[in-house]
Image (cartoon, helix red, strand yellow):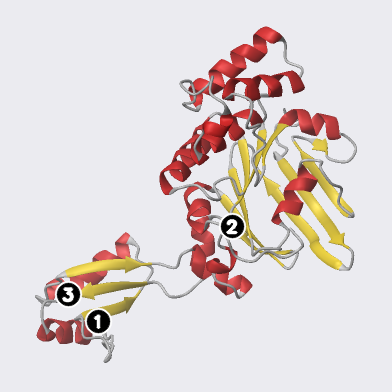
Amino acid sequence: MTNNPSEPAIAVTGLRRSYGSQVVLDGIDLHVPEGTVFSLLGPNGAGKTTMVQILSTLIRADAGEARVCGHDVVREPDLVRASIGVTGQFSAVDNFFTGEENLLLMADLHHLGRAEGRRRTADLLDRFDLGEAAKKPAVTYSGGMRRRLDLAMGLIGNPRVIFLDEPTTGLDPRSRRDLWQIVRDLVGRGVTIFLTTQYLEEADQLADRIALLDHGRLVAQGTPAELKRRVPGGHVELRFADDRALAAAATILDVAPDPADESLVLRVPGDGGVRSLKVLLDRLDAAAVEVDGLAVHTPDLDDVFFAVTGQTASATAPGSEKVTAR
């Protein structure tokens, strides 16, 4: 538990880390409130995993200060470890143990009594829909089941902060969405989630706040909506039944149709908000111009990512080449 109720779950000030001459984290400042999802995005090699390793006490920073649940990660590592759970990029599941045995092993490592360990194991197997497979070796589990078991193992100590380092890499869409719901349920119970991911949709779906890390520095922070508003390019696509309606709408809205576009679509710049959309349609309705269909296009996190890092999201897609720093 955090010692001071007003203190954030994670507080980082001036954090620096280098590998030889390569600077991986260069003066990072961030604060993560309790009971929220914070997502750290960045190209491969930006330092996301290094940040998780420092905050979970696996490695030390070269400079700066980091506190988790009110405890200093250098001076109070045992108290930090007692407060957190970690699910890394690679599964910690023992393939030769059953799901139940994996969880009981984690209970022993957390020094839980036998009865409490079995109670927590049974509860987690049920919560993660692993009850029917509890007695089966983990090697027989699907990728989604293994990921759920891996996350359940990180929860055996009832942590207040959970670090999820690219937790859904390699999962199919259904398994990924199942894990998203588990994350939402955890946050609903007051748990804080620190998420690194290569899926921008994942951050958009889950995160209360997002930070973009590039070349060791945080280049942008904010809610998903705040970050998207930084990028121009939002527009409404209006589709018409014929050339006459298209031309009339273009005149009324003072927007030139794209001469290379033969699809009877007019693109009108705008934020896509309900109020502005209503004003737009009212203007056309007042002139008796009928709209055959419409679509609202707003900048997404991919656009934000490119705007602040100069790379598209595909540069971080799973399977792309990794660099040495993590």
Q: Nearer the viewer, residue 65 or 132?
A: 132
Q: Is residue 163 above or below residue 280?
A: above
Inter-mark Cα distance, 2 to 1: 33 Å
Residue located beneath label 2 in the image: 222
Inter-mark Cα distance, 3 to 2: 36 Å
Q: Residue at x 54, y 63 (%)?
A: 227
Quarter occupied by residue 29: bottom right
Can you say which quadrant of the picture contains the C terminus?
bottom right
139 relative position to 283: left or right: right
Labels 2 and 1 touching (C-beta < 8 A): no
Image disc number at residue 284: 3
Q: Is residue 230 visible?
A: no
Q: Residues within 10 Å of mark 2 (few under 14, many from 20)?
A: some
Labels 3 and 1 touching (C-beta < 8 A): yes
- How far across and down, in percent of the image, does residue 154 sit? 65, 31
Q: Residues within 10 Å of mark 1 (few under 14, many from 20)?
A: few
- How far across and down, in percent of the image, does residue 1 sit? 72, 27
Which amino acid type is shown beneath numbered disc 3?
Answer: Leu
Q: Residue at x 46, y 26 (%)?
A: 129
Given this view, does label 2 or label 1 mark the residue nearer the observer?
Answer: 2
- How far across and down, in percent of the image, does residue 28 sit? 77, 58
Mark 3 lies on a secondary structure that is helix
Mark 1 lies on a secondary structure that is helix
Q: Residue at x 53, y 38 (%)?
A: 183
181 relative position to 197: left or right: left
Mark 2 lies on a secondary structure that is strand
Quarter occupied by residue 139: top right
Residue located beneath label 1 in the image: 253
Which amino acid type is shown beneath numbered disc 1?
Answer: Leu
